[in-house]
Image: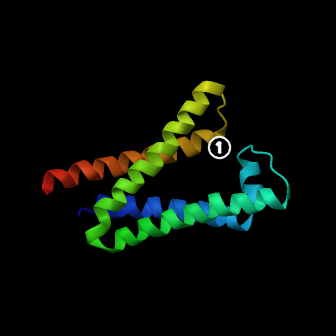
């Protein structure tokens, strides 16, 4: 598969891993920077599990697909679905509430860009298959 596929998979995987690690290390602070007010050990544990653990798992799976040519197409579908779903839900939330912070715009741009790159890679790979 072309270089675009490998770049997309690596960026997508590292994005999930980076955010997952941040949520494991400083869960309340990370979500506080996004404007979410959470307190206490139960909240920190839940953030670590869902935002930390799930994102680490997704990122690891995507990186593994980048390393194994047989799984690259599946990895692209995962990137497309995960980042696309998050981006569409964020867009809906922003439209419904009118919320528009720098954090939200940055996250939305990142999510939609990675979903678009994965979609383009999938289209290109289906034309060469």
- Work out whether residue 20 or residue 18 is closer to the camera in this orientation and state it: 20
Which image quarter holds the C terminus? bottom left
Q: Residue at x 52, y 59 (%)?
A: 15
Q: Position of residue 47 (x, y in %)?
A: 70, 58
Q: Is residue 24 left or right of residue 109?
A: right
Q: Is residue 89 left or right of residue 112?
A: right
- Give SS at disc 1: helix
- Work out whether residue 1 or residue 58 is closer to the camera in this orientation and state it: 58
- Work out whether residue 125 or residue 54 is closer to the camera in this orientation and state it: 54
The color scheme shown is rainbow
Q: Residue at x 45, y 59 (%)?
A: 12
Q: Position of residue 62 (x, y in %)?
A: 42, 65
Which residue is labeled 1 in the image? 103
Q: Is residue 45 left or right of residue 87?
A: right
- Work out whether residue 111 or residue 89 is closer to the camera in this orientation and state it: 89
Q: Residue at x 48, y 69 (%)?
A: 60
């Amino acid at each position: 598969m072309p270089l675009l596929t490998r770049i997309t998979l690596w960026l997508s995987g590292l994005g999930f891993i980076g955010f997952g690690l941040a949520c494991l290390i400083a869960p309340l602070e990370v979500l506080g920077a996004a404007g979410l007010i959470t307190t206490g050990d139960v909240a920190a544990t839940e953030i670590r599990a869902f935002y930390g653990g799930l994102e680490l798992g997704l990122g690891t799976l995507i990186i593994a697909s980048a390393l194994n040519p047989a799984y690259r197409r599946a990895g692209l579908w995962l990137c497309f679905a995960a980042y696309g779903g998050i981006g569409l839900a964020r867009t809906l939330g922003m439209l419904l509430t009118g919320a528009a912070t720098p954090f939200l715009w940055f996250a939305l741009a990142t999510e939609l860009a990675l979903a678009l790159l994965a979609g383009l890679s999938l289209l290109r790979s289906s034309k060469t298959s």
